[in-house]
Amino acid sequence: MTKRNMVVSDANSGFDMAISMAVSGSCVAAQRPPAYITISKKKLLQNLDINSSARINTWLDSMRASSPTHMKAPPLSDDQVSWNMRRPSALDMFEQITSASKGKQIVMFLDYDGTLSPIVDDPDRAFMSKAMRATVRELARYFPTAIVSGRCRDKVYSFVRLAELYYAGSHGMDIKGPSKGSRYKKGTKAVLFQPASEFLPMIDEVYKALSEVTKSTPGALVENNKFCVSVHFRCVDEKKWSELAKQVGSVLEGYPNLRLTQGRKVLEIRPTIKWDKGKALEFLLESLGYSNCTDVFPIYIGDDRTDEDAFKVLRERDQGFGILVSKTPKDTNASYSLQEPSEVMTFLRRLVDWKRMSLRRFLRMRRRLEEIKMSIPN
Ligand SMILES: O=P(O)(O)OC[C@H]1O[C@H](O[C@H]2O[C@H](CO)[C@@H](O)[C@H](O)[C@H]2O)[C@H](O)[C@@H](O)[C@@H]1O
């Protein structure tokens, strides 16, 4: 029996369903799927017939629905209007946000792809602009700042190139503190945390197998993110999505300790350990000495499904908030929204300016108080 640790993260998600179809042959042979298979047995049986065109059409529709090239252009739909009301722009709500943070230490968490850099076809060319880098550098002068990415940590560092930041790569499974002095690091110990290190050889093996098996699918790209692997289908013809899903499924069949999640036109394969961007956020807060503090205000900005784990943690802690980067309505645990990386940069700049002004005001007041003290005769 081949066990399959598979997370079907979204009932309507085409690719998740495609993967379940691709591996269902082995699952049906089992007497009873283990509890960690989150897809129901009934659904598995429904999905059994890989050649059923009705099934394939269902998930292809769903993939198209989540693909920007198929999205309807404005005018704003009722959905969009109501979403804008429920998840207002963080720029429009800037004053409310800063006043909620009063007296608290803001800690910044930033996703990389789609948040600091625009989404592009070639993952190796997802550069952030010079202006964005300068903004993040300034941000880190005023607030402890971490980059939390699905990418391999070294790779995301090579894009951001700011040594004063914290980096959590591989969806938080590879965390490292600043290599350059950070004024916010309370302890003296260097932070390095890799909860999935035992999976390294397995991930490497799977990376090689996936690269080999997907060779025949034009446009498919496999990326080694050290503790996880990404299979990109952004450049794969839609007609080939089902073929690619089957290829990925055929490799994963042999790896019960790996699970599959979905990002933006990417399938992400990672260890089943209970670790995600939300856990990484909590770990970083603890490293910074804020684990049990009420005077901390974490802000997490991200665009992807994997960022939802961090948004959820903030909601549950009732601390700070999440900002989802998206132009279209999505189910989210974030409190606010921004449309695209350029808006993220504007928001970060405003935070820096606001903090700088507050500090100046504080220093002016302190100087004035000293002058008053000096002018009072003994
Ligand atoms: O957590 P993130 O930093 O958002 O990383 C998630 C994935 O990001 C990258 O893929 C995405 O961006 C690419 C470049 O713009 C784009 O081509 C791709 O379609 C997107 O899914 C990265 O390459 C993946 O490894 C990450 O898992």
Image: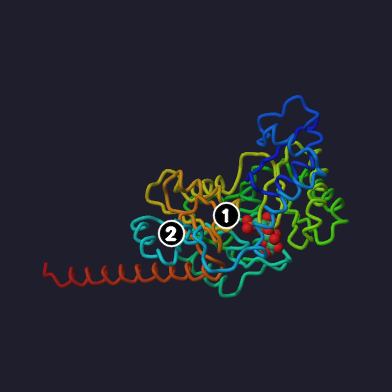
In the figure, 184 relative to 24: above or below? below
Ligand 1 positioned in quadrant: bottom right
The residue where tag 1 is placed is 177
Is 212 on the left or on the right of 113, as rendered?
right
**Which image quarter is the C terminus in?**
bottom left
Residue nearer the viewer, 185 or 260: 260
Is 92 on the left or on the right of 306, as rendered?
left
Q: How busy is the neighbourhood of tag 1: few (under 14 within 10 Å), some, or many (20 plus)?
A: many
Q: How busy is the neighbourhood of tag 2: few (under 14 within 10 Å), some, or many (20 plus)?
A: few
Q: How many numbered circles are shown?
A: 2
Q: Secondary structure at mark 1?
A: loop
Q: Secondary structure at mark 2?
A: helix
Task: Point out residue 308 in the picture as x, y percentages from the top left corner.
Answer: 55, 50
Whichever of callouts 2 and 1 sits on the residue coming sooner in the sequence is: 2
Q: What residue lies at 76% left-to-right and 32% top-to-bottom? A: 3
The residue where tag 2 is placed is 85
Residue nearer the viewer, 70 or 263: 70
Mark 2 or 1, which is nearer the eye?
Answer: 2
Q: Are marks 2 and 1 in contact (CB under 8 Å)?
A: no
In the figure, 344 relative to 303: above or below? below
